[in-house]
Amino acid sequence: MRKLYHFHGGIHPSSNKTQSTQTAIARAPLPSLLIVPLQQHAGETAKPVVQAGDHVLKGQLIGMPDGFVSSAVHAPTSGTIAAVDMQLIAHPSGLPNLCATLIPDGKDEWVPLKPLDYRNRSTAELQHLLRMAGVVGLGGAAFPSDIKLRTGKQKITTLILNGAECEPYITCDDMLMRERAAEIVQGAEILRFMLDASEVLIGVEDNKPEAVAALQQAITASSLNHEVVAIPTIYPGGSAKQLIRVLTGLEVPSGKLPTDIGVQCFNVATAYSVHRALAKGEPLISRIVTITGNVREAQNFEALIGTPIAELVALAEALPDTDAYIMGGPMMGFPLPALHVPMVKATNCIIAASAKIFPPPPPAMPCIRCTRCVEVCPADLQPQDLFWFAQSREFGRAQVFSLFDCIECGACSYVCPSHIPLVQYYRFAKSEIRAREHDKQLADQARVRHEYHELRIEREKREKAEKLAAKEKAAQAAKLASAQPLTPQQQAEQAELETSRAHIRELAQSEVEHTDEGVTK
Ligand code: SF4
Ligand code: SF4
């Protein structure tokens, strides 16, 4: 029995998970159109390689990775590209992004797939294949997985698969583990192979006994020695640093990454996608998404990336008093700017919200310094101090108090008796600091450019003067070189001439002196 550890704080909100785990994962029907954002992940937007009017097959590349932190994007079905333009997407910023709109032809016809045996390929090749298959983290951040596998000289001892799924309402990972455990285990083995890790731990909260049993069975059947560990159900136990702490007892130091302590973490759904990408040759074009909340029938659907959220919500039948839709969970999710936005690789859950489910919070009151926020903070921070610094715009002090270690889990806001929306203050402070750092970076770049410009002008002036001097010197030398040498006779005549000139000058001088004497006398 593995020894488990605790992290500081944590809370126990109502899980609200049973509503969406009563039925098996359903395949969402082909939508009327697909809007596929070319930025599905953290980092650079993929470069479009299709244009309006192109016919594409399912799984065909439509966005080429562009930059180090970038990942490919593919057509989720066969059909015709209707447009490549800016569209509103599911993002907290509410800003539009470049998207390819695809009208399905109904045939759902695949490109020729190229499955492979990962054991015959180098790690570098596998990293490239995952980048080109568009595999990104499906736990929420959607960071390109190939980057997390490029650990350089860092030795990875432990690979952790995150199946904790601690946030209320979300059950997509739970259902995936119950129904597709064998593929998750195979994906974990590919990741272990690529990282050369010594052990694989799959952490699952103990409120998911069916998932734990399914994984255990898959591991036994595969003869792999991965270990499924049921961990205590406490929010936010699924956050990477907290999960690492619980499973290994190790702390990821402030400002460091798990790889710095020899650990790497992937979500269970990411491991599943890795297996599909390599063993089946299928790029990441769909995912499991929980549709829940104020709906007639909460359920998990396997849906194509780019499906308009409105079409997904219709499958679960949102109730008439629904007044908003949240992407993600109630603790860390954000309200959707509109219902026609498409689902993306990071869309794990859509919650139909109503005043009945999420009553509007009472007005915020002043902080009473009760320190309840401190007790529950899993990052061991001082949330009330961070709140003061953010409110008074003392961003430097907020940074000193480790603002960037805040994982925005919302546990502090959840317990605050003054109903202060603390996380909103932390997000505001972080975005201000990032904006200032960005401005400073731009100013530094402009200063360096100006200094370089000045240096260049100075250098050009100097080079011009040097060239001019060299030219004059060369002309002088040429003049001297072109002069004819005198013959002996000419030299004798020249000497005679010089003697005569000297004689005349002497005579003239003595005459002047003589005249002067006469005048004087
Ligand atoms: S829980 Fe709220 S009221 Fe209490 S110290 Fe924290 S911010 Fe202040
Ligand atoms: S949101 Fe940040 S400050 Fe609040 S409990 Fe979570 S980690 Fe701590």
Image (cartoon, helix red, strand yellow):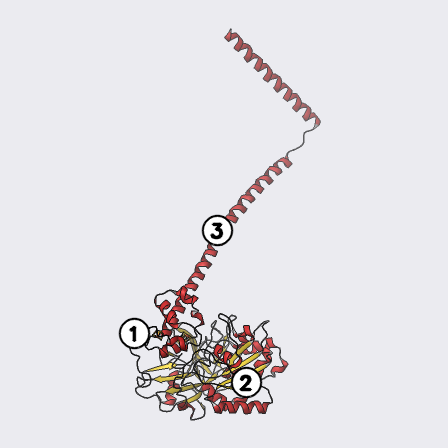
* Element on which disc 3 rests: helix
- Residue linked to disc 1: 365
Q: Residues within 10 Å of mark 3 (few under 14, many from 20)?
A: few
Nearest the eye: 142 or 134: 142
Disc number lying in front (3 or 2): 2
- Choose between 13 and 335: the one closer to the eye: 13
Distance from the alpha carbon under mark 3 to that under mark 1: 56 Å
- The disc at residue 2 is 2
Under circle 2, the secondary element is loop
- In the rendered view, would you say 489 is above or below 512? below
Q: Where in the figure is residue 139, as x and y percent of width and height?
A: 47, 80
Q: Is mark 1 within 8 Å of ligand 1?
A: yes
**Looking at the picture, does residue 325 appear above or below residue 96?**
below
Mark 3 or mark 1, earlier in chain: 1
Figure quadrant of the N terminus: bottom right
Kind of residue at badge 3: Glu
Residue 324 appears anywhere in the view: yes
